[in-house]
Amino acid sequence: MTWSTSVLTTVSSDTEPAIIITFDKAKYLFNAGENASRSFLQSKRNWKKTKGVFFTDVGSHRVGGLPGLLMTFADATIPGLTVYGPPGIVHYMATMRLYTYRDSMYVVPNEISLKPQLSDAPQPCFKDENVTVYALPLLPPIPASQILEETVSASESRKRKHDNIASISERLEAEDLMPEQLTDEMADEYRQLAVRTMFPADLKEPAPKPPKTKRRKKGKGEPDEPSSSQPQSLPVKEVSQKEPPHDASPPIGDHFRRRRAIPPKGFYTQLPKFTSTFPVRDADPSLTPVLSYIVVGPRYRGKFDALKAAELKIPNGELRSALTLGKTITFEVTEDGKTFQRTVRADEIVAPSEPPQVIIILEVPSVAHIPSLVATFKESPFYSKFRRSPDADLNLRCIFHTCGPGVLEDPRYTAFMNSFHDKCHHVIASREHCPDPVTFTSAAFQQLRLRGLDSEIFAVPKYSLELAKDFKAIPGMPERAQLMTSSSTIHLRPPTDVFQETAVQDLDTFHSVATGKEELVLPPHTLKAYNEARDAVKVQEANSMQVVSRGGDIGVLPLGTSSAVPSKYRNVSSTLITIPGYGNLFLDAGEGTWGQLVRMYGRNPSQPNNVWDVLRQTKCIFASHIHGDHHMGIAQILRMRRTLDPPPTAPLYLVAIRPVHLYLRELSDVQNMGLDDPSGNGVIQVMSEALHWKKPEAYAEYGRWRLGGHEPWTEINMSKMNATRLCEALNLDSVRTVDVRHRTICYGLHIKSKDGWSIMFSADTVPADALVYAGQGCTLLIHEATMADDQEDLAVQKAHSTHGQAVAIGKRMNAENILLNHFSARYPKLPSFGDTDETRVIVHAFDHANLTIGNMWKLKHYLPAVIKSMKDTEDEDDQKLDELVANSGYGDVAI
């Protein structure tokens, strides 16, 4: 049996560190920030056989990729998964309930106590036949009495919750309670029930095994079986199959009447509030408790010397099995006509066993966490043994360090690193020291190729291969220390040093060309297409055939154009609108939007128009509906906004339907995102339902478009007033939502500037007459075109539009410009030729295209050349994405 540890993602503009431990029949993932699923695709690593996911923190930078991963895992037929993390991880997962549903998989979330275990024999948080995992709480310096009070109550609650999870629905009904009124145990039970409703696949507690009367002979290279005295992974009680009562009026309907699990009472209302002794996660990491992990692999028995056993005439069967168990045997043997008793010790026949290999995964977000870390390994007899040299009991092979600001250069930390034996490898992720190479090199390479077509529209993503600081210059840095890369790998069995995985590196066609080490060579047919496209643009410019549209300088930057799931080449939905002199607006923000934005603008604060400037000038985020591929990136954007220094001097208006607001308000219990900021410059909630283009005086109380709740923050006049302030901030005459036809409640958005230009955004929809009426004569229509024209039946099934249907809506609307986006599959599946209509501009969106309303007409001439370039690099794996997108997706289901 072999096993290894590799890096899925490291610190970069668009990823955070994530570690994979791989056995022949199982995988274990540690952390899953945004873009985790897309990184699997880029590296061609396989996510199948994943059994557990472990988190060091509950902030969006560590868990932001979990919703997408869970849906991806379920679609990959993974039957079940256990999730481990600090207190708050169950609450985080419960906040996903309105947009995450898979009935083919069970998911069991487990919260790990923050009470340090410094005893001689701490209990592992997880154990199976492959690994034993110990969790190490790293705490900021706050009074120990507060920590004890919180962690003990949380631990006791966890011991009881499995027996009560089925009864909580009955108690809600009997006592006439709503979830937000619950506290303590009942609150924990309800969160568990919410997760169980999201992933309702049957999960039964395994039947007890009968006593063993005879041990099977262990094959060569198999690990020792776990001792029955050691704790195994926690069994999960069978949840009652009795259907809990449904809410009387759930706000989220499914227009296509698909069958879903019946949710419990209060499912569509506010969760119980999650509270903690520690401050809510915010811009200052020094106040947040985190977890680190020690992972101990299996002990492999030594090789049985069959030749020597035959020489000593040891009979096959039980006696040989006893030797493999370490026992001494005595048996009768006849030699030279004499019969006598022969005694054989196990060490005469069986080679010494291989000691368990160990890795450590450390999360140290600030220098304030260093004392807690050092104390754990110094004061605990159990954990201190991991610092000693390899022996028969264990062999620490590698430590993965994720270091926050100032940590790596702190003398206490380097002293801690040197307290381990000198053969231990140290793999370091530190933004202060690591370079920032491109993560999604397949997409970047396409952009690099297209730069030769138009360097302004197809700009190369921002990256840096230079070390931010030389970590080797830090005094006392261990000799075997190295920076973490997305190809860093160490084999634990058979053992190797840390190396760079060539299979991953070979997929990178971007950096060698971008740095000039290799020449970019385009095929003659592609060069010809480039020349023809550029010539066509020049002719149109010379003949003054292109009249500059109103709002010609308005930026339209597609950050994600993929439908439902990301691919190597495209991210999920988001478009940035920039209004010079006034600010910016996001139209949807799927997972990974922040990373796409950073690659577009760069994070160097000394450069003009950097990502921090763009973020500071962002005045609005519009989320069209609850499907995850349209809003799962909002939390990370709001988290990064909290880090701006100095803080923003104007608010950010979040325009969304009630379920999106509800999700973010619940999420703010574990991560401060600026809601209800007393400065007035935080996040201001605006209800999409209040801005309907027909200007309602009150919300609908019945039917598909009913609001579904009456929380104070939903008050209609307050939303209208805040919308007026948003218009003032962005120099808009109006901002209106338009009801469209999708699988769930969904709104498009129409904005009209005081300068005369207007934009209509369709969101996800089948062809909708309301868009035509509300957006009549708009300057730009951004319309989804998920399906090709020969997939009209599939478009109806998925509640999307075809290319031709989107164009037809634009023509009926009399839109001057039509930008198509939200495409299924990948770019080569786009129509080979643009629309022949000469009265308006009809073009296709591309990730990271630097467009304005005034220059997007060029894409009409560029499209044939773009498609030829993309076909040049197409491979067989890319073709498989068609089926993936057609049959699954982040945004394809909601309860």
Image (tube, helix red, strand yellow):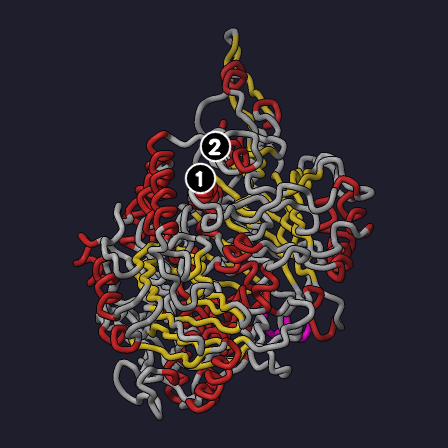
Q: How far apart are marks 1 and 2 (CA)?
A: 8 Å
Q: What's the residue at 71%, 54% (across, down)? A: 120
Q: What's the residue at 47%, 74% (across, down)? A: 189
Camera-side residue of 538 and 62: 538
Local packing at callout 2 (Cα closer than 10 Å; few below 14, some 14-19, many 20+) is some
> Which amino acid is tagged 1?
Arg
Residue 510 vertical position relative to residue 57 in the rendered view, above or below: above
Secondary structure under tag 1 reads helix
Task: Specify start and end residues of the magenta stretch as a single range.
Answer: 148-156
The C terminus, quarter of image: bottom left
- In this rendering, does residue 523 appear at all? yes
Dominant SS of magenta comes to helix
The answer to whether residue 669 is left or right of residue 846 is right
Camera-side residue of 887 and 848: 848
Q: What's the residue at 37%, 86% (across, down)? A: 173
Q: Is 857 included in the stretch rendered in magenta?
A: no
Marked residue nearer the N-terminal end (1 or 2): 1
- In this rendering, does residue 207 appear at all? no
Residue 95 vertical position relative to residue 544 in the rendered view, above or below: below
Q: Where is residue 401 in the image (x, y as percent from the top left)?
A: 67, 48
Residue for badge 1: 449
The answer to whether residue 263 is left or right of residue 84 is left
Q: Do the residues labelled 1 and 2 touch (CB within 8 Å)?
A: yes
> Which amino acid is tagged 2?
Leu
Q: What's the residue at 63%, 83% (across, down)? A: 678
The answer to whether residue 677 is left or right of residue 543 is right
Camera-side residue of 678 and 540: 540
Q: Position of residue 26 (x, y in %)?
A: 45, 44
Residue for badge 2: 520
